[in-house]
Amino acid sequence: MQIEKHKIQAHNQSLLKLHQEKYDFIAVGIKNIEDLLQQLMHFQVAIPSWALGAGGTRFGRFSIGGEPRNLEEKIEDVGLLHALNRSSGAISLHIPWDIPSNAADARALAAQHGLRFDAMNSNTFQDQPDQPLSYKFGSMQHVDSAVRKQSVEHNLEVIRYGVELGSTSLTVWLSDGSCFPGQLNFRKAFQHTLESLQQVYEALPANWKMFIEYKAYEPNFYSTSVGDWGQSLLYATKLGEQAYTLVDLGHHLPNANIEQIVALLLMEGKLGGFHFNDSKYGDDDLTVGSIKPYQLFLIFNELVEGMDARHMNHANDLGWMIDASHNVKDPLEDLLQSVEAIMISYAQALLIDRKKLTEAQQNNDVVTAQEILQNSFRTDVRALVAEARLRIGGTLDPLAFYRSEKVRQQLIKDRGSKTVATGL
């Protein structure tokens, strides 16, 4: 479905007067507003191909209708999101869920929508129909070298697809682990995993990054072979300069200080990227910022401070991606909300007076430090985000436009009410 530019212009015109009033109000107190807007305009969040259809739980899945039936329609859906918010300019694929039938055609279609291919994601947490050996008891950690070899070959295949699509990174998330004490030898599991990862790492193109994603538990509940950021950092350090840790916000134990983890990984030059989502209990994969918006802001505070300390480019030097499962919402509406929440937290972090915060920290002025952070968090920056979006051709209110144009109804009309997207 193509969004006609004249409809976006008409939508913006109807909201322009009120937007201008809100923007003028907040702009008065911001000295470097043009620099801030430029940073917002350049910041892009990759959309995962598997998040474009209805998700589900082990209890059931409820289709919403109009779900993308193939990779081409998934690219079109991300293009639709990007046309509305101008901040979703990349798509991340999961293989084998979204193997391109023709990489050149897929790349051309993505370019038509102003998209690039972000990190490629391998899958050794499921058994595929034509797969000779099972991952029931692990993949890269498996006691059987033939299973480990199969998992390595799959990752090499993913890299080949990524090269054809123009991607420059590979994300490896392993569900490997154990459910019961004594099920496996921890040291041997680590060594097997490292040896397997080394084989994949050696095949990386020179300009690629390898992201090692960790998770505390699930589907294994007693141990996980890459269970926390320390284990991921250990693997990445042993592998080499092209290997990094990837942080998924839902992959931590309750009350983990994610912002401190981010700060330390940045300090070590080993933070590779993010999977944004939100959670109440575990890996809930909920809409970004829907449960813990202050935590998201604190994470971005550390991201901005840490990246600036290393003279990194906010938009390009880390991988930014959403990872969510939409069980009760229209996935496209959910993704619009998530990108908006990310942009808001990023804008709030950019507003922080770093000089005053550093002074407060050096003087052990805890009250002032808290006030500085909370003042930025409590600032309504939605008009700043909307202004950045307006300047690069997006809609002032993407969600309102999506609903007023009845996009989901049109997708159902075009694709049918019983379609099921590949992936989650």
Image: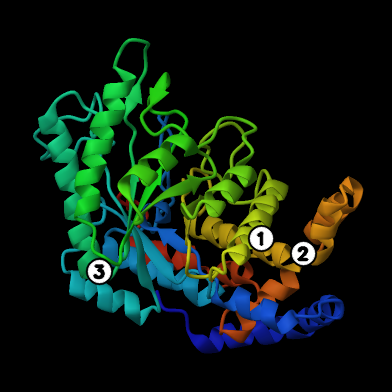
Whether label 2 touches label 1, CB < 8 Å: yes
Residue visible at 50% across and 64% down? Answer: 45
Dot 3, how many residues are within 10 Å of its Cα: few (below 14), some (14-19), or many (20+)?
A: many
Quadrant of the frame with the N terminus: bottom left
Q: Secondary structure at mark 2?
A: helix
Q: Nearer the viewer, mark 3 or mark 2?
A: 2
- Under mark 1, the amino acid is Glu
- Under mark 2, the amino acid is Arg
Q: On the image, numbered disc 3 is attached to which residue?
A: 165
Q: Nearer the viewer, mark 1 or mark 3?
A: 1
Extreme-front residue of the structure: 362
Image coordinates of residue 86 in percent, x first then y, are 53, 75
Rendered image quadrant of residue 358: bottom right
- Disc marking residue 305: 1
Quadrant of the frame with the C terminus: top left
Q: Is residue 159 left or right of residue 245?
A: left
